Amino acid sequence: MRSQMAGVLFRRAMARSAVRVRYPDGRVTGTTGPILDVRRPEALLARLGAAGLIGFGEAYQAGDWDADDLVGLLTVLAGSMGTLIPPSLQWMRHVHGARAPRAERNTPDGSRRNIHRHYDLSNDLFALFLDESMSYSSALFDHPGEDFTTAQHRKIDRLLDRTGVTLGTRLLEIGTGWGELSIRAARRGARVVSVTLSAEQRDLALRRAAEAGVASRVEVRLQDYREIPPIAGGFDAIVSVEMVEAVGAAYWPVYAEAVARRLAPGGRVGLQMITMAHDRMRTTRSTYTWIHKYVFPGGLVPSVPAMEAVFGRAGLRVHDRLDFGLDYAETLRRWRATFTGRSAEVAALGFDATFARTWNFYLAYCEAGFAARYLDVSQLTLGRAA
């Protein structure tokens, strides 16, 4: 029965969107748009019936369907997300949808497990598709075709400029990545404390800081943001790049208070974060998605109003904001092109074909979200409320 109902909803959803569906017998439905090639119809509908939208992603992982223009297909679907399922049937999502496992809650132990599942996969894997700065967040482009690392440095430098990082600045970075922001801040003469929950990231960030000649000004700790001890007078600047998405809504107030308590009087906070529209965030905040299950457990993409409210209650207000979501679409396009172009090297690291399809879908899924304006990315600069 679930498969039959899934079949009805699938056909209705495809008919409502500008997508053509091609079946194994050569039959094609729809007249315009990218083609979704159904390879195993029964398996696809069984997965949709069992797991809804999670099943749609799992069906791609398993090869039940494919698309020559995967990003184009997913961009069309992302742009139609609010209308794919008839309003009269939207309630089914809350009954039929999966619930997040309790083990993925972002308690201190849960956060360590969640981060380990993604960021500790392999430094060598990330090095295959990231630019030479090893930046795993949106670049900020000045023009199409710009050098990737130059655009990544522009993103970093804008955050450092807005938070006043210069000679003698005491800087706290929450979420180390692989160390590029810390290195650039240290080259300005700042003294940096950076925290991460990824042992793989910490090891490489320390090595890169040493190679850059700034090891004496960069301390990288394997530490949760809740465990950072305050320093006398506070940090002059605190920056965090695309980390708040991993905090989880239940812990946003804890995160904001942790930042506010460690900020010096007159200090500045620089946040870069993936965002979505506030009403969309409210509607989907309890939804367990394919991304949660296979890529980023425990997270939630916030809205700017939600972050303004959370940080406002902690005594901080937004002084400056920049939105640049289409730059993230271009960032993801470049990552995915490099990842798929180096498939043999991915396999040589021990990652199988299912992993490669999973990550191809993940990168395309995210690119489509930004291209369709379903998602955005923002840099916020915050300071003490007057």
Image (spheres, rainbow, N blue to C red):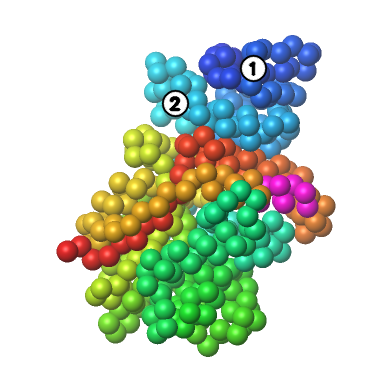
User: Residue tagged by mark 2?
Assistant: 82
What's the amino acid at mark 2? Answer: Gly
Between 44 and 362, the residue placed more toward the observer is 362
Q: Residue at x 62, y 62 (%)?
A: 149
- Tell me if 241 is positioned left or right of 66 in this view: left
- Tell me if 1 is positioned left or right of 309 in this view: right
Q: Residue at x 58, y 68 (%)?
A: 178
* Numbered circle sitting on residue 1: none
Q: Is residue 302 visible?
A: yes
Of the 4 image quadrants, the one containing the N terminus is top right
Rendered location of residue 256, percent (x, y): 31, 61
- The mark closer to the camera, 2 or 1, is 1
Seen as rendered, the residue at the extreme front is: 143
Mark 1 Cα-neighbour bin, 10 Å: few <14, some 14–19, many ≥20: few
Q: Was residue 124 drawn as part of the magenta stretch in this picture?
A: no
- Residues in magenta, as a range: 335-342
303 shown above or below 350: above
Of the 4 image quadrants, the one containing the C terminus is bottom left
Between 213 and 62, the residue placed more toward the observer is 213
292 shown above or below 204: above
Rendered location of residue 150, percent (x, y): 60, 62
What's the amino acid at mark 1? Answer: Thr
What secondary structure predominates along the stretch shown in magenta? Answer: helix
* Number of numbered discs visible in the structure rendering: 2
Marks 2/1: CA–CA distance: 20 Å
* Numbered circle sitting on residue 32: 1
Mark 2 Cα-neighbour bin, 10 Å: few <14, some 14–19, many ≥20: few
Rendered location of residue 195, percent (x, y): 47, 72
Find out whether the residues at labels 2 and 1 contact each other: C-beta distance under 8 Å. no
134 shown above or below 51: below
